Image (cartoon, rainbow, N blue to C red):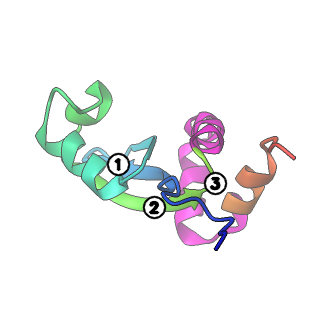
Amino acid sequence: MSDDAPDNPAPPWHIYLLRCRDGSFYAGISLDPERRCKEHNQQASRASRYVWSRRPAELVWQRTVASQSVALQLEYRLKRLSKTHKERLLQDDTGWMALQASIKTAP
């Protein structure tokens, strides 16, 4: 019996936004955004300096993406959006669709 699906499919990558205590946003990628948020808040050695200095941070937005490569491309663009544009992502998916459309994906 042959099966085209791999025995151990790769876990999905996520892109996420944290809202920090001062109202600013932090964008990142992770296999587990909830775990990563806890690390940012509780483990100085695992946290980004930005988030650690603005704790607590709350996970306010996340999306599943196709691969780590796609996640990195989206993170790059997300980090360059204005705070206003990031706020819009929380309200509706229009901005998310535009962000996805802005990257080149492999055929």
Q: Quadrant of the N terminus?
A: bottom right
Q: Image quadrant of residue 81?
A: top right
| Position of residue 94 measured from the top left corner of the image (x, y, whole percent) | 72, 66
Q: Give 23 or 71, whichever is nearer the viewer.
A: 71
- SS state under label 2: strand
Q: Main secondary structure of the magenta part?
A: helix
Pick whichever of labels 2 and 1 is earlier in the sequence. Answer: 1
Residue that carries the numbered disc 3 in the rendered image: 66
Q: Left of 41 or right of it: where is 100?
A: right
Mark 2: amino acid: Trp
- Tag of residue 23: 1
Question: How much space separates mark 3 and mark 2, taking CA atoms?
Answer: 17 Å
* Residue depth check, mark 1 versus mark 3: number of the one nearer the observer: 3
Circle 1 Cα neighbour tier, 10 Å, few/some/many (<14 / 14–19 / ≥20)? few
Residue that carries the numbered disc 2 in the rendered image: 61
- Residue at 62% x, 71% y: name it: 92
Q: Give 47 or 86, whichever is nearer the viewer.
A: 47
